[in-house]
């Protein structure tokens, strides 16, 4: 029996490869975004611990103004760092959005080729069925002709 051959199989394989590459890029972007968010969370935890320490240990009794000024400078530096990390997160989110769009486009292109392959396969199956029907019909005609010839020889 004949075997189905899709002439554009190489294109389909290439599109699958492109889609997998886009998945890897998206995963990388998501990891970078998660790392930035974890960095911001760590910074937030550090600021909370420092603020809690200030409230519990340095706001009672004699106030050390030098320490309070240093704490204020530390808080301003942490705020600047948080803004920087937030900007990194926003950029990472933009890259994630772009990567998702690229992945969606790659998946769409792959699906187009798969649909084309399915249509070609269906057409090939229909052609094979028609060819088989013609062959069976020819065999039936030959059997009928042979049967008529055999009955004509007997008469």
Image (cartoon, helix red, strand yellow):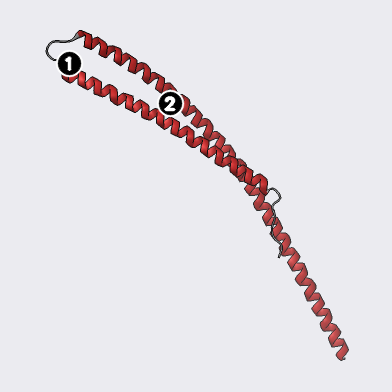
Q: Which residue is mark 2?
A: 89
Q: Is residue 11 toward the left or the right of residue 91 in the image?
A: right
Name the residue: 20% across, 8% down.
65
Q: Nearer the viewer, mark 2 or mark 1?
A: 1
The quadrant holding residue 4 is: bottom right
Answer above or below: position of 47 versus 26: above
Q: Position of residue 38 (x, y in %)?
A: 36, 30
The quadrant holding residue 51 is: top left
Answer above or below: position of 142 versus 104: below
Q: Position of residue 128 (x, y in %)?
A: 72, 62
Q: Which mark is residue 97?
A: none
- From the image, which quarter does the N terminus lie in? bottom right
Q: Farthest residue toward the top?
A: 65
The local secondary structure at tag 1 comes to: loop
Name the residue: 24% across, 24% down.
49
The local secondary structure at tag 2 comes to: helix
Q: Which mark is residue 58?
A: 1
The quadrant holding residue 154 is: bottom right
Q: Position of residue 121 (x, y in %)?
A: 67, 55
Q: Is residue 113 toward the left or the right of residue 139 in the image?
A: left
- Please report whichever mark, 2 or 1, sits nearer to the chain's N-terminal start: 1
Q: Position of residue 47 (x, y in %)?
A: 28, 21
Q: Nearer the viewer, residue 13 or 100?
A: 13
Name the residue: 30% across, 15% down.
74
Name the residue: 48% across, 32% down.
29
- From the image, which quarter does the C terminus lie in? bottom right
């Amino acid at each position: 029996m004949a075997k189905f051959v899709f002439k554009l199989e190489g294109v389909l394989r290439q599109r699958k490869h492109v889609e997998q590459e886009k998945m890897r890029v998206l995963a990388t972007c998501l990891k970078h975004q998660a790392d930035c968010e974890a960095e911001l969370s760590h910074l937030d935890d550090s600021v909370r611990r420092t603020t809690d320490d200030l409230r519990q240990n340095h706001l009672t009794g004699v106030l050390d103004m030098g320490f309070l000024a240093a704490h204020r400078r530390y808080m301003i530096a942490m705020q600047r760092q948080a803004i920087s990390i937030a900007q990194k997160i926003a950029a990472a989110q933009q890259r994630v959005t772009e990567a998702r769009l690229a992945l969606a486009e790659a998946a769409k292109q792959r699906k187009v080729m798969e649909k084309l392959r399915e249509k070609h396969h269906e057409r090939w199956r229909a052609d094979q069925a028609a060819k088989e029907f013609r062959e069976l019909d020819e065999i039936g005609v030959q059997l009928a002709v042979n049967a008529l010839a055999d009955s004509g020889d007997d008469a």
